Amino acid sequence: MRAIFIFTIAAISALTALGGETNFTPLALSGQTFIHDPSTIVKDGARFYIFATGIGIRTKSSSDLREWTAGNSVFDAPPAWTTNAVPGFNGYIWAPDIVRVNGKFFLYYSVSTWGKKTSAIGLATNPTLDDTATNFLWRDGGEVIHSTSQSAFNTIDPSALLDTDGKLWLAFGSYWQGIFLTELNPQTGLRVSTNAPLFQLAWNHSIEAACLTHHANYYYLFVNWGECCKGTNSTYEVRLGRAEKITGPYRDRDGKDLADGGGSPFLHSTGRFIGPGHIGILRDGDTTWFSYHYYDAETRGRSRLALGKIDWSSGWPVPVK
């Protein structure tokens, strides 16, 4: 515990010097809140839904964003193409993200193995998230994009954004050469073409978990720096930049390009809330919520769901209670 305490204080001090937030604590949640790599929260009818890393993709839902209940996994068994695309894949699906397009939900997910670039992003679709509805059915949409050991990028951690002009985009990436972006077909959810352009958005020696959003005149890119999955020894923190075009360049508050290692602090470890990561943005009425996971020092480092609000008044997203 002494080592953890020293790390936390050091991390907070360093980020304070960079202008990071030190006093943010998330909204109190209850119910089934243990989760890892949560997706964007989406609303369907009267309930909110979220998806997460796990066998077959784990699901949770809530009527009020406070009390969460667990649901059934998306897949009973992984789609057949996954084990062919990624040798050694065992059905433990990573870091999904979801977006509603033309009345249909597109759920993107990662197929990979630890520390390797042979990965793929897949797609599942459903007209509804209400599992009591007669038309509730997850359909496998197949592979969206893949990477190999020779690729510049790693195709994990998808983040989907439906733009105001109706175009659909997918950001992804982890380590190596960082975060990339490609355009998708909003009718199919797949790439507009197999050789569609790829845009590098951000890089750091330890970067992943991109989240794209649009507000006012800018696109905002949240990313994680540091290491996940080590409980209270995790060093995850959230950085961000913004751009006038979705394809970039994204620059931080100091004007440094995220593709050149830039990134302004947004969220970091504080108190029991260690290693925050995997930002998702939800707009509900006039409120912008952001979701993420953290490693809870009070439950031996198990990862939990957290929610906060965003204040846009400065032109930059700032976490508020």
Image (tube, grey):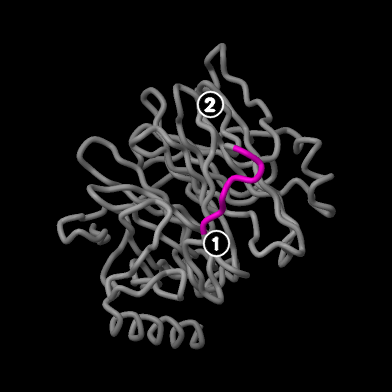
Q: Nearer the viewer, residue 248 or 70?
A: 248
State the image coordinates of residue 87 (x, y, percent, origin top left). 84, 53
Is the residue 253 above or below the residue 99 in the image?
below
- Quarter where residue 165 is shown: top left
**Which quadrant of the figure contains the C terminus?**
bottom left
CA gap, disc 2 and disc 1:
38 Å
- Quarter where residue 156 is shown: bottom right
Q: Amino acid at mark 1?
A: Arg
Q: Which residue is mark 2?
A: 187
Residue 139 sits inside the magenta stretch:
no
State the image coordinates of residue 74 (x, y, percent, origin top left). 63, 34
Q: Secondary structure at mark 2?
A: loop
The number of numbered discs placed on residues in the rendered structure image is 2
Mark positioned earlier in the residue sequence (2 or 1): 2
Residue at x 54%, y 33% (from the top left corner):
185
Residue at x 54%, y 38% (from the top left corner):
184
Label 2: how many residues lie within 10 Å, few (<14), some (14-19) or many (20+)? few
Tag nearer the camera, 2 or 1: 2
Q: Amino acid at mark 2?
A: Gln
Residue at x 33%, y 37% (from the top left corner):
164
Q: Secondary structure at mark 1?
A: strand
Q: Which residue is mark 1?
A: 302
Using the rendered image of the protein, determine whether residue 312 is visible from the camera's viewpoint: yes
Give the magenta range.
Answer: 193-199
